[in-house]
Amino acid sequence: MSEEVIHTPFNPLDGAAFTAGSGPRLLMRPSRDCARFSLRIAEAHLEKAVEAFGQDIPADIGKMSSAVQRTALCLGPDEWFLTAPVSEREGIAARFAEMSERATHSLVDVGHRTVGIDVSGPAAALVLNSGCPLDLDNFPIGGGTRTILDKAEIVLMRFEREHYRLEIVRSFAEFVWNFLSVAGREFDLDSGPLDQTGASR
């Protein structure tokens, strides 16, 4: 039996890394590759979506559930952003397809258009606020929203007190990465500028 081949789309941030300050105070890494879906479904059918996804899907806007490498973020009254391991992409899509007759919905695979950046450390909120208008120090842990970073639309999630994740349209990934790298340097988080691998120049 031949092995399943999983095709991973090109990530413009592959191999990139940025650290600044002792500790470090700021750490940026491309997020682990994962399956990404945009789900639209009426709240009345949300329990069926939970069965298909295999994890709780919160009904309240801005709330997020996260466990076993899966996340479900409510972005609007009938809109969710879902992530799961790449190996589960086909199974999740198949289960949602099976429930189509019982619950009208739209599940779109957005993995080829979106990439993620994990931003962590004591200075994470400060650096993100150089381009994001939200009060990130008081942004709820376990929450997320659609917002902007400078000129780029992003989905922002907060997993821990000092751990944020940005989901960005692939064509804006390098722009966002460079913007945050410059912001890290401007906040004097390190003794010298860093290149994309985190090495001093």
Image (cartoon, helix red, strand yellow):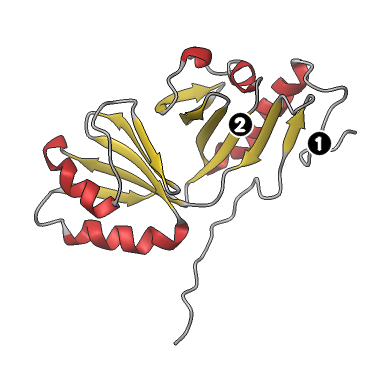
Front one among 2 and 47: 47
Callout 2: 10 Å neighbours few (<14), some, many (20+)?
many
| Residue bearing mark 1 | 195
Q: Given the current orientation, which residue lies at the most extreme bottom position?
A: 1
* Residue 133 visible in the picture: no
**Callout 2: helix, strand or loop?**
strand
Front one among 39 and 174: 39
Q: Amino acid at mark 2?
A: Val
Please determine whether, in this image, residue 195 is positioned above or below residue 8: above
* Percent x, y of residue 162: 58, 25
Tell me which residue sits at (78%, 24%) in the image: 21
Tell me which residue sits at (65%, 45%) in the image: 13
Foreground mark, 1 or 2, reads: 2
Front one among 31 and 108: 31
* Percent x, y of residue 129: 58, 16
User: Where the N terminus falls, by quadrant?
Assistant: bottom left
| Residue bearing mark 2 | 119
Tell me which residue sits at (36%, 63%) in the image: 90
* Residue 63 visible in the picture: yes
Front one among 116 and 113: 116
User: Where the C terminus falls, by quadrant?
Assistant: top right
* Percent x, y of residue 160: 51, 28
Q: Is residue 146 left or right of residue 57?
A: right
Q: Is residue 45 left or right of residue 178?
A: left
Rendering quarter of residue 92? bottom left
Q: In the drawing, what numbered circle is on residue 70?
A: none
* Percent x, y of residue 34: 48, 52
Please determine whether, in this image, residue 178 is positioned above or below residue 12: above
Callout 1: 10 Å neighbours few (<14), some, many (20+)?
few
Among numbered discs 1 and 2, the one appearing first in the sequence: 2
Q: Amino acid at mark 1?
A: Asp
**Callout 1: helix, strand or loop?**
loop
